Amino acid sequence: MALTRGRVITGAAAFRETVERLRQQILEEKADWPNILKGLRDMRARLADGKPQLGLWDLKRGSGGLQDIELVAQGMALMQNCPDGATAAQLHSAQHGQTPVIADFACLARSHDWLSDLRLLHHLMCGTDVQSEASAEGGLARVRRIMQMGPEVDFKQVIAEHRQRCAQVIDQVLGQSEGQGSEG
């Protein structure tokens, strides 16, 4: 799945084109839904065990987090032969392509954008992804202003809602909810 985001960044144009054709050929050979689904499930479980979420402001890790969304986007890109490495483009391809599952990939794309913006702001203010100092009143006021949110916004609730919706969509894609998803 890592090849779905791989790009040649240096070298002569002919070399870059040759490598890109090889990358596309490998991706086309790997577009087998049962194997992709198994790989997604296995990787998600390994990430949950090896890199658990470290608190509210760890927007990257954990169920419904950025890493979870990006994992599914890469799997869908592999299935769709989507040449674009951007998460939003991969999810857009899944939303409008012929995937073996029907899911709200647009919801994942919107939440990925929102969580990414929030993570970047938090990182800029605190110097780390998971420190809670951004929750101080001054920090939250800045985040609200930049994200165009009113003072009544409860960040814990909004983050939890985004992550819960994303986790539900991802569980549906991976067939982990009762009676949902499929293996082909």
Image (tube, rainbow, N blue to C red):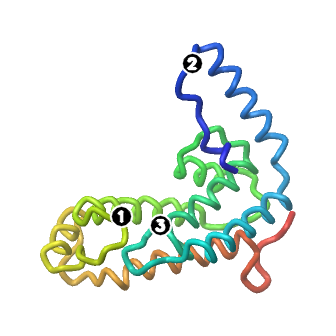
- Secondary element under disc 3, as helix, strand or loop, is loop
Mark 3 and mark 2 in contact? Answer it, CB < 8 Å.
Answer: no
What residue is disc 1 on? Answer: 119
1 vs 2, front mark: 2
Q: Amino acid at mark 2?
A: Gly
Residue position marked by numbered label 3 in the rendering: 60
Position of 111 compared to 30: left or right?
left
Q: Are marks 1 and 3 in contact (CB under 8 Å)?
A: yes
Mark 1 burial class by Cα count in 10 Å: few <14, some 14-19, many 20+: many
Amino acid found under the numbered disc labelled 1: Arg
* Residue 147 point in image, percent of width and height: 26, 64
Q: Are marks 1 and 2 in contact (CB under 8 Å)?
A: no
Residue lying at 53% horizontally and 23% vertically, measured from the top left:
10
**Residue 11 shows which numbered tag?**
2
Secondary structure under the numbered disc 2 in the rendered image? loop
Q: Nearer the viewer, mark 3 or mark 2?
A: 2
Relative to 95, residue 48 above or below: below
